[in-house]
Each structure stands twice: as structure tokens, then as C-alpha cells.
């Protein structure tokens, strides 16, 4: 009798606190034929902690085109495959979603093994509306694409959830303030870990705080939804050099003023700096 296909298990892993690993997750990782991991070195530490000895293979953004079909072939041959990300649910801001599509196209059953997730953890602790929300994830790095996406989000009534790196947080908060207005927001930092922190406040206030002292650790940003009215004003903006001068007159150091104006307008810092130098000649 021909053996049926295996099952692709999407296994959540802790986002910081190892106690958040579920009993079912441990069992699935032990029983699978292979574990596909975003970073095998990182996952090996988790497996060691829970005394799991299942073979590991790497599956990440740079090898998914070749490794994905290999994993689907093993699934089709009857092996169970567990896929994990570095933290949280695979398929959220990682290539696990591509493997799911390949498996479904091949007729392979896909089963989620739920657990920790940074976006939902931050949302439920934020105090903002949880009835309707939109997960945005990481904003594009390219300035034009980022501006376009942020502008498209400005009037949506949904609570917005972003992932951001600590060194870019202040710039992102400034850019969102310019596009959305000074609406309520929450910065969740190091969720479930020893130094977990939630910073509540208007976007501009949070922007000033984290511009003065850059945060450390993993960041999840939750922002209140729009009210249906565009936050950006129709009046023409000052020239970048004028905006910088106004901030400097108010006591903001020139370097910080340039950074803030560049972030608010989605401009390269060098362009704003050159405009300031030209205005000072």
C-alpha cells in the first residue's frame, strides 16, 4: 500500500522566554523527521534546552528556492517536517509562508502549532483597540516605497502593528508622526524577556524619547488607527533648511534636527544636510 504524504507543521517557538514553549510544540519537534530552521545555530540552542535530537536543516530567505522543493519532496515521500523561525510563528515576516504555499500546491497537509507571537503579544498589552487591527511588519527600506506605504496607512481605522529595529525606531516614529499626526502609540521592547518594557504615549513624544536615547532589543510598535481624516496638512511645508533652523532655534542640536526633518519628510539625511549648508553660506 502506497504511503500517504507527511505533514508540514508550523511550530511556534518562544520570542524570548523559554517557558512559553508549548508541550505540543516540544512533542512535534521531537517526532518530526526533520526541522527546517531559519538559523540552525539559534534553533540548536532551543533543541538542546528541551533535549530534542531531531535533525536540522537550514531554510531561510537565501536558500528557500532550492531548499523548499527538497522539503516538499520529503513531505510527499511521507516524512513529517516541522518548520520554525528564530522566534514566534513561522510564516510571519519570514520565508515559512513560501514553504506553506509549496506544500499546499503539492497536496501536502499543513498544520499550525500555535504559540508565542510578538505582534499579538504587544497588541493585547497595548491598551489600544483590538477589535480591528492590521499587521504591517517591517516597513520597506527604500525611502520611496516606505513613504508610499505609510501614506496608504494614514487614514485606515485599524490599529497598526509594526516590527522595527532599535536603531531605526526614532526615525520611524518621526515619519509616522508626520504622516499620521500625533496619535496614541505603544512601543513594546524585549517582550517576555527580563527587561520587557511598554512605553505609552503620543507618537511625537515617543519619537523624542527614543531619539534622545536609542532603545536596545527587539521592538514591536503598535499605533492607534486613523479617524478618517488625513493627518497631513495641505499647506506647503517649509524648506528643509528652514525646518531645521526652527528646531535649532528651539534648542534641538543641529545633527538631531537634520535627522528629524529627514525622517519626517522621507528624505536622505545628506540631502537635508546639504540644504542646511547651502542656506548658511
Image: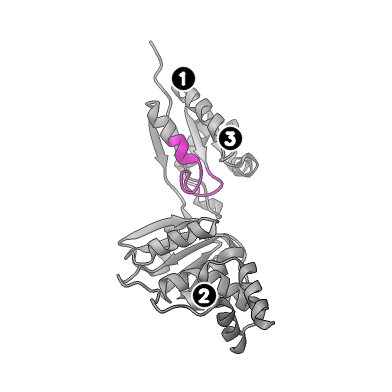
Q: Which residues are magenta?
A: 85-100
**Is residue 234 highlighted in magenta?**
no
Q: Nearer the viewer, mark 1 or mark 3?
A: 3
Secondary structure at badge 1 equals: loop
Instruction: Determine if residue 195 is in view.
Output: no
Instruction: Determine if residue 21 is in view.
Output: yes
Question: Which disc is residue 77 wearing?
Answer: 1
Q: CA distance from mark 2 to mark 1?
A: 52 Å
Indicate whether 44 appears above or below 5: below
Q: Main secondary structure of the magenta part?
A: loop
**Quadrant in the rendering for residue 160:** bottom left
Q: Of residues 151 and 105, which is closer to you in this image?
A: 151
Indicate whether 188 appears above or below 260: above
The residue at the point 51 percent across, 70 percent down is 265
Question: Which disc is residue 63 wearing?
Answer: 3
Give the quarter of the figure containing the C terminus: bottom right
Q: Earlier in the sequence, mark 3 or mark 2?
A: 3
Secondary structure at badge 3 equals: loop
**Is residue 86 highlighted in magenta?**
yes
Amino acid at each position: 500500500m502506497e504511503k500517504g504524504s507527511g505533514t508540514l507543521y508550523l511550530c511556534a517557538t518562544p520570542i524570548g522566554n523559554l517557558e512559553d514553549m508549548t508541550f505540543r510544540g516540544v512533542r512535534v519537534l521531537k517526532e518530526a523527521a526533520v526541522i527546517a530552521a531559519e538559523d540552525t545555530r539559534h534553533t540548536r540552542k532551543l533543541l538542546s534546552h528541551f533535549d530534542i535530537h531531531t535533525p536540522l536543516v537550514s531554510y531561510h530567505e537565501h536558500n528557500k528556492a532550492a531548499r523548499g522543493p527538497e522539503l516538499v519532496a520529503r513531505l510527499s515521500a511521507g516524512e513529517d517536517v516541522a518548520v520554525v523561525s528564530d522566534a514566534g510563528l513561522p510564516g510571519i515576516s519570514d520565508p515559512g509562508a513560501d514553504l506553506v504555499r509549496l506544500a499546499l500546491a503539492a497536496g501536502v497537509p499543513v498544520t499550525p502549532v500555535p504559540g508565542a507571537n510578538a505582534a499579538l503579544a504587544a497588541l493585547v498589552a497595548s491598551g489600544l483597540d483590538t477589535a480591528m487591527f492590521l499587521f504591517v511588519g517591517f516597513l520597506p527600506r527604500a525611502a520611496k516605497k516606505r513613504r508610499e506605504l505609510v501614506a496608504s496607512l494614514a487614514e485606515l481605522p485599524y490599529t497598526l502593528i509594526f516590527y522595527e529595529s532599535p536603531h531605526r525606531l526614532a526615525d520611524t516614529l518621526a515619519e509616522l508622526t508626520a504622516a499620521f499626526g500625533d496619535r496614541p502609540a505603544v512601543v513594546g521592547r524585549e517582550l517576555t524577556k527580563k527587561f520587557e518594557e511598554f512605553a505609552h504615549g503620543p507618537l511625537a513624544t515617543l519619537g523624542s524619547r527614543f531619539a534622545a536615547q536609542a532603545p536596545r532589543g527587539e521592538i514591536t510598535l503598535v499605533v492607534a488607527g486613523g479617524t478618517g481624516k488625513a493627518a497631513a496638512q495641505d499647506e506647503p511645508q517649509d524648506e528643509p533648511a528652514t525646518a531645521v533652523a526652527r528646531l535649532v532655534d528651539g534648542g534641538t542640536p543641529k545633527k538631531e534636527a537634520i535627522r528629524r526633518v529627514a525622517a519626517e519628510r522621507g528624505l536622505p539625511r545628506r540631502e537635508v544636510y546639504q540644504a542646511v549648508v547651502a542656506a548658511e553660506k
